[in-house]
Image (tube, rainbow, N blue to C red):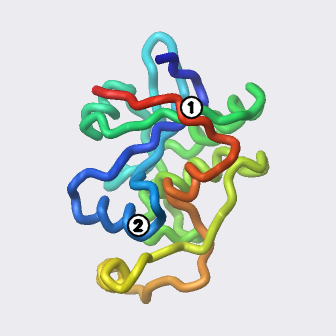
């Protein structure tokens, strides 16, 4: 399967509690993480934002091993110029901290926030009200935010891997494996 610069890698839910809560809270798909392919030669590299490292670049091989092969490849319908601009924006965010609050005014970025910022202004992704699922998921998220010294956010726009994958500008290419 051919991988191209600008492709997105969506990670399916594993068995960690946080993974399960993200997947259950944010939609019918079970994606819990997203990364952007930024380089093909001499070795495929991706940029993503993850805990605790924040925004980082790594090889596709390392990315896949850490995600136990639970990765789907999607391609964006966008001109090459727009893809190159998005990759440049993503690279400008390298070394930013992780955004644990998922709120837009936090200094860091979370995975889907990195992608929406990279493609900002290209009408590919829309921000949606942050979702926290049903009563069981909301209980988890209430405790999560309490540890951050915050109340559960209400009426705040953001994104999730599950909201991004709904874009009509994405095409499923296939499953990747480590």
Q: Is residue 141 toward the left or the right of residue 55 in the image? A: left
**Which residue sits at x=42%, y=52%?**
31
Q: Is residue 149 toward the left or the right of residue 28 in the image? A: left
**Which residue sits at x=74%, y=25%?**
80
Quadrant location of the C terminus in the rendered image: top left
Q: Quadrant of residue 29?
A: bottom left
Of circles 2 and 1, which is in front?
1
Can you give x and y, in whole percent of width and height, for residue 70 in the image? 32, 39
For the residues labelled 2 and 1, the Cα–Cα distance comes to: 25 Å
For the residues labelled 2 and 1, say whether their Cβ atoms are less than 8 Å apart: no
Can you give x and y, in whole percent of width and height, for residue 151 in the image? 43, 89
Tell how many labels. Answer: 2
Q: Quadrant of residue 60?
A: top left
Badge 1 is on which residue?
7
Can you give x and y, in whole percent of width and height, for residue 114 in the image? 55, 50
Q: Earlier in the sequence, mark 2 or mark 1?
A: 1
Q: Is residue 174 toward the left or the right of residue 87 in the image? A: left
Q: Nearer the viewer, residue 30 or 101?
A: 30
Q: Nearer the viewer, residue 94 or 73?
A: 73
Badge 1: residue crowd in 10 Å (few <14, some 14–19, many ≥20): many
Badge 2: residue crowd in 10 Å (few <14, some 14–19, many ≥20): some
**Which residue sits at x=48%, y=64%?**
27
Q: Which mark is residue 100?
A: 2
| Above or below, 74 relative to 124 | above
> Tag 2, which secondary structure?
loop
**Which residue sits at x=51%, y=17%?**
2
> Tag 1, which secondary structure?
loop
């Amino acid at each position: 399967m051919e991988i191209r610069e600008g492709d997105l890698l969506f990670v399916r839910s594993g068995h960690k509690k946080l993974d399960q809560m993200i997947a259950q809270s944010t939609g019918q798909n079970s994606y819990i993480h997203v990364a952007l392919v930024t380089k093909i030669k001499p070795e495929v590299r991706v940029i993503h934002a993850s805990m605790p490292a924040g925004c980082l670049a790594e090889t596709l091989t390392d990315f896949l091993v850490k995600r136990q092969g639970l990765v789907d490849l999607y391609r964006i319908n966008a001109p090459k110029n727009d893809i190159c601009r998005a990759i440049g924006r993503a690279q400008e965010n390298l070394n930013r901290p992780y955004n644990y609050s998922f709120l837009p005014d936090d200094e860091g970025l979370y995975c889907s926030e990195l992608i929406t910022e990279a493609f900002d202004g290209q009408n590919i992704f829309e921000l949606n009200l942050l979702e926290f699922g049903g009563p069981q998921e909301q209980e988890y998220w209430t405790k999560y935010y309490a540890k951050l010294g915050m109340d559960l956010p209400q009426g705040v726009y953001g994104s999730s891997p599950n909201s991004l994958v709904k874009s009509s500008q994405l095409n499923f290419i296939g499953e990747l494996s480590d």
